[in-house]
Image (spheres, helix red, strand yellow):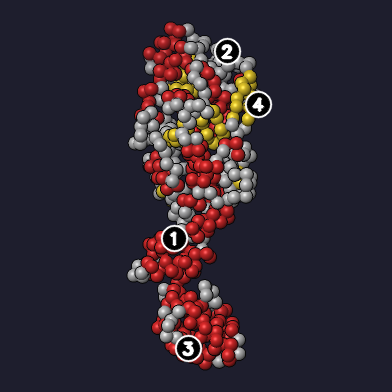
Amino acid sequence: MSKKVRVRFAPSPTGPLHIGGVRTALFNYLFAKKHGGDFVLRIEDTDQNRYVEGAEDYIVESLNWCGISFDEGPNKNEKFGPYRQSERKDLYKQYADELIASGNAYYAFDTAEQLDAERKGHEEKGKTFIYNWHNRERGRLVNSLVLTEAETKAKIEAGEDFVIRFKSPQDETLHLTDIIRGNIKIDTNVLDDKVLFKSDGMPTYHLANIVDDHLMEITHVIRGEEWLPSLALHKLLYDAFGWEAPEFAHLPLILKPTGKGKLSKRDGDKMGFPVFPLEYTAPDGTVSRGYKEDGYFPEAVVNFLAFLGWNPGTEQEIFSLEQLVADFDLARVNKAGARFDPDKTKWFNHHYMQQQLDLELAEQFKAIRPELSDIDVNYIALVVGLIKERATFVNDFWDLSHFFFTAPTAYDEKASKKALKEGTADVMTKVIELVNATDDFTVENLQTNIKGWITDNEIGFGKVMMPLRLALVGALQGPDVFDIMYMIGKTETVSRIENLIA
Ligand code: GLU
């Protein structure tokens, strides 16, 4: 690779960014950083009908949250700018004109009704209408290939709506190469003459995308599989302009958890997982959940996205963004669809939870529980250290730890049946004595005193430890009983045992 690697993520701001889009951005980023190149964000907003207010901000915030930072983009290092296609609008017409001049494109004046009629007529005969070599010069379609130059000019001057179509070649075989899929052969006779430009002054995706990739000196186009059918046209456009085409890599689809079909928002709604990085409120007010708000760490999201289509070829599953940059290779991206596994995303989150500092987690915990507002964050951090191994999300913390902060207000029924026997009150009264007698109130001393007493009197551990746990927790769950006693302190321990006796 001699030229500096330059890649781009080119989303259309038509709504929230699906995690598939985040994965495309991630793979572009990894490839760029791996090769010391640039990662460009370009907003493809030429289709004004599908434009959604706020979608661009959502894209930028999502990438920022994941730590996928772009080197150039709207309002950032704009050396090839602007990076919004709507702001580059005036630039594209000359390229469409250039293609007309070189015979690679033509004006077409067919109305929507005429094209509809063609489509229906074909359907009735069991055929599919494609606007191409087969019919573009037969006289039924109205374009500059059949009109005289003067007629064409007159129509344009009279303000008739037109489009500029690409004139796809006849009877040729295209040899395309994709880094992930290898060599692909395409018969040009199956291609349709795609619209490149419209009389409203806007280019279509195809023209704007190729012109911008060229002007922005993009060396590698890494994008979703859904764009593979456009590859032939894109290659033909590069050839028509006489430009060197970038290399292409089409990433595999992300499949439903069942492995059948593309992952959709509906799958997430049905099975209870987000498909968007951040929560999204649509213009109509409907809210879609996001990984961030569901309590995922960005490191976990990046890690699971990396494995949707790529693998390192080893057993290693845990990769930081830096490690991914070091190990990423397009040669290890599969062409087969990647099955999305919601359990695996939780597994990653559990892993990254253990890596977080207890104090940081404590701050997040405190922020979501009003009960903790007056409690010292250092105490909360100690609690977090005792329970986080059993948590996947910070949201799980309260259920696992409320008894470190408040006394039980009720006792679990089943647990009570199991733990409370005749004589429990006497045993618990004795435990209170032992607790009170433990001057140096450490986990070790408590353990020695209480366990020692149990052994000396041959009482049976369950008879003491079960009601004791019930008194402290309200149920028969939780971390080590002696840890809990130490954490809540002597007075609170005694008070909770008294409550149970009462
Ligand atoms: N604007 C296209 C999209 O929304 C970009 C496709 C491409 O990367 O060429 O995905």
Q: Secondary structure at mark 3?
A: helix
Real-space CA distance between mark 3 and mark 2, rounded to the nearest whole angstrom = 102 Å
Considering only order in the chain, which callout, 2 or 3, is on the residue closer to the N terminus? 2
Residue 235 sits in quarter: top right
Q: Amino acid at mark 2?
A: Arg
Circle 3 or circle 2, nearest the eye: 3
Circle 4 or circle 1, nearest the eye: 1
Real-space CA distance between mark 4 and mark 1, rounded to the nearest whole angstrom = 65 Å
Residue annotated with mark 3: 434
Circle 1 or circle 2, nearest the eye: 1
Given residues 392 and 329, the one toward you in this image is: 329
Given residues 36 and 193, the one toward you in this image is: 36
Residue annotated with mark 4: 126
In this image, 373 relative to 323: left or right? Answer: left
Q: Is residue 178 above or below residue 271?
A: above
Disc 3, disc 2: CB below 8 Å?
no
Q: Is mark 2 within 8 Å of ligand 1?
A: no
Real-space CA distance between mark 3 and mark 1, rounded to the nearest whole angstrom = 35 Å
x and y percentages locating residue 489 in the rendered image: 41, 79
Considering only order in the chain, which callout, 1 or 4, is on the residue closer to the N terminus? 4
x and y percentages locating residue 19 in the rendered image: 50, 45
Residue annotated with mark 1: 357
Q: Secondary structure at mark 2?
A: loop
In this image, 416 relative to 281: left or right? Answer: right
Real-space CA distance between mark 4 and mark 3, rounded to the nearest whole angstrom = 90 Å
